[in-house]
Image (cartoon, grey):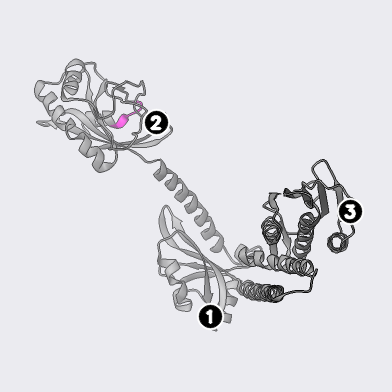
C-alpha cells in the first residue's frame, strides 16, 4: 500500500503550516482549495479515533499522474499500520488504484492489499470536493488480516460442508453408501429443522428412543427438543454431550453452507451411555477408595494417640525408646495416606512430599539436646502406588532414626542428608540417607536395620547397603520403579 521510504515526521504531528507548505510546494491547488484541505485535515484525528483506522489525505501533484500524501492520523494509542510517517510520500496507481479511481470521478472506491509488514489492509477512498471539483482524496485504511483469515476459514468450512451434503444426498442404491458405514446416527436437516436424510444408525436410534419410524419430513426438534438450542445458537460447529430419553450422546451440529448461505444442518450423534456408566462406576470406586484411605489414616492416628497417651502416663524404665520407635513407624505409615488425601489422588503417592514429611517428623520427635538438621535433595516427580509407598516410608523412617540413634553420640550437632532420585536409564529409584557422624565403631545389628533389609529385598525386590565414607555413614536402598508416570 503506502510507500515505506520512512520519514522522521511523527504520526499525527503535522501542523496547519506543514499541510499548507506541502500543498503549495507539490500541488497546483488554489489557495481556497488548500484552505479546504487544511480544514479537512483538522478533523483527521477525530475520524481516525472514531473508526479505529489510519486516515490520510492525498492530493494530485503538479506532475500529471502523480499523487502525494499531505496529511495523516492514526488512532490514539495505536501503533499504526506502517513503521513511520508517510507524509510527503508519493502514491502509485499500481499499489493504490482506489485513490486514482476517485480522482478520476468515482464517488467511492475500495481496495485490499498487503503491506510490507505483512498486514492485509482494506482501503476506502472518497473524494474531497470544493464546489464540485475534486481537490484531493480522503483515505481510511483498516487492518483486516483477522477478517481475511476468518473468510478463508469460512470458505474452507463451506467447501467441507458442501462435500458432506453431497455425501449424504448421494444415491443410497450406490453399492458403497458412505453414510451407512458411519457408526454415528446421522441426520441431514433443512432450514426448518425437518429431516431430509437419515442413515441406518439414525433410523435405529429414532425407533429405539422415541418409538417412531424415522422418515423424511419429520421435525427433528419435535423428536429431540433438548437439542433445539444447539441448532439455533448461530454457531457453525457445536459439540456437546446431551441426555436423550435416558441415554447419553455426544452431539455434533454442523451448519451446511453454500456460498456463505446456510442451507441446513448436519447432525451426528454418538451413543456414549456405556462410557458414562463406566465413568460413574470409576468415580464411585474412587470415592470408596479415598474413604478407605481416610479411615486407615484415622485408625493409625488413633493407635498413635493411644501410644502417646501411654507414654505421658509413664512407662517402665528403658521402654520409652521402643515406644517412640513404634510411634514413628505408625506415623510413617499414616503419612502415606495423608499425602494421598492431600494430593486428591486415588492410590498414588508423591514420594518427595512423603519423605520430607517423615524426615521432619522423626527429627522433630528427637528428644535429645543436640542441634540436628535434615536436608533434602529429592526428585519432585516420583510417584508410587500406595503399597510400595508404605514400604518406602518405613525404610526412610528406619534409616533416619538409625542416624539419630547411633551417628551423633559424641557430637553436639549433626546433619542428615536425604537423597531421592530416579535413574531413567535403569528405571530405578534410589534412596540415600547420609549422616555426618564421626563415630567409626562397627555396625551393630538392630531391629530397625533388619526391617530395612527385609522390606528392600522382599517387598521392593531391591538392595540395601550401609557403609562408612569420608562424611559419615550412608545407607542406600535401590529398587525398580513400580509407580505411575
Q: State the residue at coordinates (24%, 16%).
A: 63
Q: Position of residue 181 (x, y in %)?
A: 64, 65
- Which labelled disc corresponds to residue 443? 3
Distance, label 1 to label 2, CA atoms, is: 56 Å
Q: Nearer the viewer, residue 426 or 50?
A: 426
Q: Which numbered disc flags the more N-terminal residue, 3 or 2?
A: 2
Distance, label 3 to label 1, CA atoms, is: 73 Å
Q: Vertically, is 86 above or below 441?
A: above
Q: Position of residue 477 (x, y in %)?
A: 82, 54
Quadrant housing residue 191: bottom left
1 to the left or right of 376: left
Q: Which numbered disc flags the more N-terminal residue, 3 or 1?
A: 1
Q: Main secondary structure of the magenta part?
A: loop
Q: Nearer the viewer, residue 260 or 254?
A: 254
Q: Residue under circle 2?
A: 115
Q: Is residue 208 visible?
A: yes
Tell us which disc is closer to us: 3 or 1: 3
Q: State the residue at coordinates (68%, 53%).
A: 381
The residue carrying pointer 2 sits among few (fewer than 14), some (14 to 19) or many (20 or more) residues within 10 Å by Cα, namely some
Q: Position of residue 34 (x, y in %)?
A: 13, 24
Q: Which numbered disc flags the more N-terminal residue, 1 or 2?
A: 2
Q: Position of residue 219 (x, y in %)?
A: 45, 75
Q: Secondary structure at mark 3?
A: loop
177 to the left or right of 153: right
Q: State the residue at coordinates (22%, 22%).
A: 60
Q: Secondary structure at mark 2?
A: loop
132 to the left or right of 380: left
Q: Nearer the viewer, residue 445 or 82?
A: 445
- Which labelled disc corresponds to residue 222? none
Cβ–Cβ under 8 Å for marks 1 and 2: no
The magenta-colored residue range is 94-98
Amino acid at each position: 500500500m503506502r510507500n515505506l521510504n520512512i520519514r522522521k515526521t511523527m504520526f499525527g504531528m503535522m501542523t496547519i503550516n506543514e499541510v499548507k507548505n506541502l500543498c503549495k510546494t507539490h500541488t497546483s491547488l488554489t489557495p481556497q482549495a488548500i484552505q479546504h484541505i487544511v480544514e479537512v485535515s483538522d478533523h483527521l484525528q477525530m475520524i481516525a479515533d472514531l473508526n479505529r483506522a489510519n486516515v490520510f489525505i492525498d492530493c494530485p501533484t503538479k506532475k500529471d499522474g502523480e499523487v502525494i500524501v499531505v496529511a495523516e492520523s492514526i488512532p490514539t494509542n495505536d501503533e499504526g499500520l506502517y513503521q513511520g510517517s508517510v507524509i510527503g510520500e508519493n502514491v502509485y496507481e499500481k499499489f493504490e488504484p482506489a485513490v486514482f479511481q476517485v480522482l478520476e470521478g468515482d464517488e467511492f472506491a475500495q481496495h485490499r492489499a498487503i503491506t510490507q509488514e505483512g498486514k492485509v489492509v482494506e482501503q476506502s477512498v472518497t473524494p474531497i470536493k470544493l464546489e464540485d471539483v475534486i481537490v484531493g482524496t480522503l483515505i481510511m485504511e483498516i487492518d483486516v488480516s483477522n477478517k481475511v483469515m476468518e473468510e478463508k476459514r469460512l470458505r474452507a468450512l463451506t467447501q467441507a460442508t458442501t462435500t458432506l451434503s453431497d455425501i449424504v444426498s448421494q444415491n443410497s442404491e450406490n453399492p458403497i453408501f458412505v453414510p451407512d458405514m458411519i457408526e454415528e446416527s446421522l441426520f441431514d436437516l433443512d432450514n426448518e429443522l425437518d429431516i431430509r436424510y437419515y442413515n441406518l444408525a439414525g433410523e435405529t436410534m429414532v425407533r429405539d428412543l422415541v418409538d417412531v419410524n424415522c422418515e423424511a419430513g419429520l421435525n427433528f426438534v419435535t423428536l429431540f427438543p433438548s437439542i433445539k438450542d444447539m441448532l439455533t445458537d448461530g454457531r457453525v460447529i457445536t459439540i456437546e454431550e446431551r441426555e436423550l430419553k435416558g441415554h447419553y450422546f455426544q452431539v455434533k451440529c454442523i451448519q451446511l453452507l453454500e456460498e456463505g448461505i446456510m442451507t441446513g444442518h448436519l447432525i451426528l450423534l454418538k451413543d456414549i451411555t456405556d462410557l458414562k456408566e463406566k465413568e460413574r462406576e470409576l468415580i464411585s470406586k474412587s470415592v470408596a477408595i479415598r474413604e478407605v484411605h481416610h479411615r486407615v489414616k484415622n485408625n493409625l492416628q488413633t493407635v498413635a494417640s493411644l501410644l502417646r497417651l501411654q507414654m505421658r502416663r509413664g512407662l517402665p524404665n528403658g521402654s520409652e525408646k521402643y515406644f517412640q520407635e513404634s510411634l514413628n513407624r505408625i506415623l510413617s505409615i499414616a503419612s502415606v495416606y495423608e499425602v494421598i488425601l492431600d494430593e486428591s489422588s486415588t492410590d498414588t503417592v508423591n514420594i518427595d512430599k512423603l519423605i520430607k514429611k517423615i524426615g521432619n517428623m522423626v527429627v522433630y520427635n528427637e528428644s535429645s539436646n543436640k542441634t540436628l538438621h535434615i536436608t533434602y535433595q529429592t526428585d519432585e516427580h516420583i510417584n508410587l502406588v500406595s503399597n510400595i509407598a508404605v514400604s518406602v516410608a518405613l525404610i526412610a523412617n528406619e534409616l533416619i532414626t538409625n542416624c539419630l540413634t547411633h551417628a551423633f553420640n559424641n557430637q553436639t550437632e549433626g546433619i542428615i542428608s536425604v537423597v531421592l532420585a530416579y535413574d531413567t536409564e535403569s528405571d530405578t529409584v534410589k534412596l540415600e540417607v547420609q549422616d555426618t557422624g564421626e563415630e567409626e565403631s562397627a555396625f551393630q545389628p538392630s531391629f530397625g536395620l533388619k526391617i530395612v533389609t527385609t522390606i528392600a529385598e522382599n517387598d521392593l525386590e531391591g538392595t540395601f547397603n550401609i557403609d562408612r565414607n569420608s562424611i559419615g555413614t550412608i545407607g542406600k536402598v535401590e529398587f525398580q520403579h513400580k509407580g505411575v508416570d
